[in-house]
Image: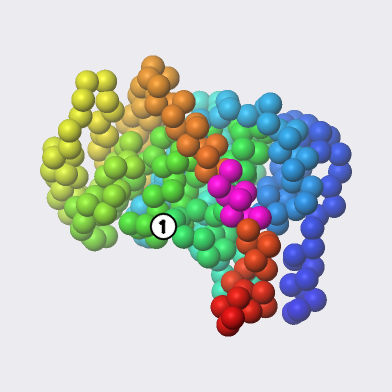
Amino acid sequence: MAELGQRRRRPLALADPEALVASARAGDARALARLVSLVENRSPELRAVMKTIAPLTGKARVLGLTGSPGVGKSTVTGALVAAYRAAGMRVGVLAVDPTSPFSGGALLGDRVRMQDHATDDGVFIRSMASRGHLGGLSLATPQALRILDAAGFDLVIIETVGVGQAELEIASLADSTLVIVAPGMGDSVQAAKAGILEIADIFVVNKSDRPAAQEAVRDLRTMLSMGRWGDGQWKPPIVSTVASAGTGIDDLTARIEAHWSWLDGSAELAVRRRARAREEVAAIAVAVLRERMGGLPGDARLDELVSG
């Protein structure tokens, strides 16, 4: 087992960065997966890769999905992938999962619900382990997002761990953030009071065929009515869906398109893109610090510092 763990941590040998990026842009899924692995493994060759892709980024739309476990984030993601593929868009998905305490990798969870797209060359799905990072994302997510952007994807969907009220980091990475709730999954008002209200661009009440669906919609409308919305500001709409049946997905994509149009006509898009760049720089700094401190918690260097 120890030998297996060492093999997992061994840096990947890197071909010419420009050739690897060119292959990924040409649709080579293996080259793209290799680039994302370099990010996750914090490879020393990553700097050369990021320098190569820097001029190629800034074109993809980024859609973030967040919400408590069990609300159907993966099902909504799969439905959105199908809708945007039907529109001819290339779609990348970064699905951040909890880290397995046994393997150290991602617990794939509901990724099986997106397997309908596994053989589609226009879709790339990658599960990423949170590796203990709080906030619903992985430290590698910002750079992985940049790689998918450079690879020519029109849309990148980021699905968070699903830790509920704590996962607010997604708002700094996404152009549009969808907060998904479901009837009977807890008090939506409490979620809104905890800060979810502030990060949502669109609320999605999924599983709306359940009896308590209208109550969830009413709770959210009550919370939104307490907000102050100035002229020209975006007020989050509420969309009801049954993603497993495809119900409401057309309405949801129309609301997403409306939000993108609003972003394009305001200064908010530039603000969000700058926030994304800051998040990436912060992630790099934290990764370097963790390396200097001895890597993951529990390593000898950290134990020594704690004991001292």
Q: Residue at x 41, y 57 (%)?
A: 162
Horizontal side, residue 259 vs residue 211: left or right: right
- The local crowd at label 1, few if under 14, some if 14 to 19, many if 20 or more residues have their Cα within 10 Å, is many
Where residue 43 appears, x then y in whole percent? Answer: 75, 53
Residue 25 is inside the magenta segment: no
Q: Residue at x 76, y 79 (%)?
A: 2
Image: magenta residue range: 281-288
Q: Nearer the viewer, residue 120 or 170?
A: 170
Query: Among all residues in the image, which is located at the extreme bottom?
Result: 307
Query: Is residue 241 visible from the viewing direction of this image?
Result: no
Pick the quarter of the image with the C terminus: bottom right
Q: How is the image coloured?
A: rainbow
Where residue 293 appears, x then y in whole percent? Answer: 65, 66
What predominant SS class does the magenta segment belong to? helix
Q: Residue at x 39, y 60 (%)?
A: 163
Does residue 208 sit above or below 298 in this rendering? above
Does residue 47 sit above or below 262 in this rendering? below
Where residue 307 appears, x then y in whole percent? Answer: 58, 82
Q: Which residue is mark 1?
A: 162
Secondary structure under badge 1?
Answer: loop
Pick the quarter of the image with the N terminus: bottom right
Where residue 138 appears, x then y in whole percent? Answer: 55, 54
Q: Nearer the viewer, residue 190 or 126?
A: 190
Horizontal side, residue 78 vs residue 208: left or right: right
Q: Nearer the viewer, residue 231 or 304?
A: 304
Q: Residue at x 83, y 35 (%)?
A: 19
Query: Is residue 119 visible from the viewing direction of this image?
Result: yes
Q: Disc 1 residue type? A: Gly
